[in-house]
Image (spheres, rainbow, N blue to C red):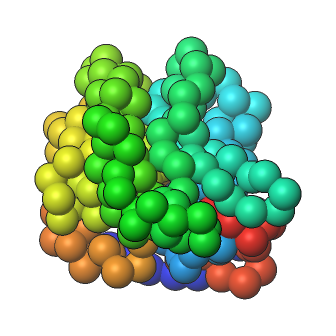
Amino acid sequence: MSSHTSTPAASLAFLSEAYNTRAPSLFLITGPSGSGKTKWCQKAVEHARQHQWPVAGLLAPPVIENGQKIGIDLLDLSSSERRRLATLRADCDGHGNGGQPPEAGVSTGAWNFYYDVLAWGNGVLKETTRADFVIVDELGPLEFRQRQGLQAGLELLDAWRYRLACVTIRPSLVGAVRMRWPWSRLVILDSLWQPASYD
């Protein structure tokens, strides 16, 4: 696995190089909170569409209100359908109910995730039987530690159902992900690529 810090232009350039090899390539996009992992994926999708690559998978854009990240949506890149995936836990924004998960949901870190939207997202990924360019934003503690979340994303990548794939992960999970997909390449976002204060 190669590992390097990347600026947008450089990382998008090597995506094109990998795509043109026609052999399956998996890139792990990592960086601390606020480094712009989701924004990087948005730029990668724009790059792919400019080059007429078929795009599939899921993007998790933030929901910002009064300058604060209060939620996370899930966007199907094939259909453009968008649903609310998670909301900020009440005990994390000072209005608290002890951080109890929402009805029919699961909590991790600062966020309450909704089972029905996770199920929808898993359905989207299961229908991605073969794609030129796949984004999975993100695979995190829900998937790797709690065995919940977007398990269909793990299955898609395990089965090599892509030509080029980009997956966002947290730095704390890099070791576990490397063990699962040792052929993957690591993209570490640095301070040069910080388009916003939120992932």
Please name whichever residue, 25 or 111, is drawn nearer the observer in this view of the structure: 111
- The image quadrant that residue 5 belongs to is bottom right
User: Is there any visible trace of residue 163 in the rendered image?
Assistant: no
- The image quadrant that residue 8 belongs to is bottom right
Q: Residue at x 64, y 55 (%)?
A: 70
Q: How many marks?
A: 0
Q: Residue at x 54, y 28 (%)?
A: 83
Q: In the image, is 67 to the left or to the right of 182?
A: right
Q: In the image, is 180 to the left or to the right of 135?
A: left
User: Is there any visible trace of residue 110 in the rendered image?
Assistant: yes
Q: Residue at x 32, y 76 (%)?
A: 174
Position of the N terminus by quadrant? bottom left
Q: Residue at x 45, y 33 (%)?
A: 57
User: Looking at the picture, does residue 155 appear above or below residue 36?
Assistant: above
Please name whichever residue, 99 or 131, is drawn nearer the observer in this view of the structure: 99
- The image quadrant that residue 161 belongs to is top left
Task: Give coordinates of residue 177: x percent, y percent.
Answer: 25, 67
Task: Give coordinates of residue 123: x percent, y percent.
Answer: 31, 22
Task: Give coordinates of residue 117: x percent, y percent.
Answer: 40, 30
Please name whichever residue, 19 or 149, is drawn nearer the observer in this view of the structure: 149
Position of the C terminus by quadrant? bottom right
